[in-house]
Amino acid sequence: MGRQVLLYLSHFFKRIMESITPQARGYDEEQEGFSLASWVMIVGLALYIAGGLGFYAKTHLWDQLTEQQKGIVVQAMMTNDQML
């Protein structure tokens, strides 16, 4: 079941990318750099990963600390910020 879902998702994204990106007009033209669609996908995935890591850190690390430990972490962050 999972393989089918991944297959359908890959086809869906392939069709989306084909509709967004310009079609190749020939082998004469050289394409330089990344297209806009690829930049949007890269930025979107980076934000998704960063958000997931932040959520993981909050739920599995920060929420497990006691109030005293949280105070120590906040104090260390403020001291480090003042040194910069």
Image (cartoon, rainbow, N blue to C red):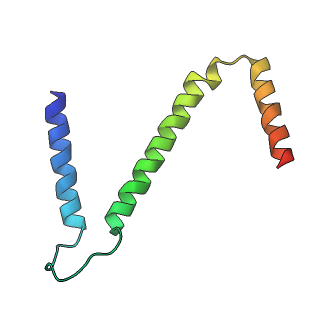
User: Count of labels shown?
Assistant: 0
* Residue in front for this viewpoint, 48 or 26: 26
Left/right placement of residue 8 relative to residue 50 reads: left
Residue drawn at point x = 19 percent, y = 54 percent: 14
User: Can you tell which quarter of the image residue 59 is in?
Assistant: top right
Q: Residue 13: horizontal and vertical position, in percent?
A: 22, 52
Residue 81 placement (x, y as % from top left): 81, 45
Q: Where, quadrant-wise, is the N terminus in this rendering? A: top left
- Specify the farthest residue to the bottom: 28
Examine the rendered structure and indicate whether residue 1 appears above or below residue 6: above
Position of 9 compared to 54: left or right?
A: left
Q: Height in image: 64 above or below 32?
A: above
Percent x, y for residue 11?
Answer: 15, 49
Instruction: Judge by depth and name the residue closer to the eye, 37 or 83.
Output: 83
Q: Residue at x 17, y 57 (%)?
A: 15
Residue at horizontal 86 percent and vertical 46 percent from the top: 82
Could you say where residue 34 lies in the image, as x and y percent from the top left? 35, 67
The residue that appears at 64% across and 25% down in the rendered structure is 62
Q: Quadrant of the rendered structure where residue 16 is?
A: bottom left
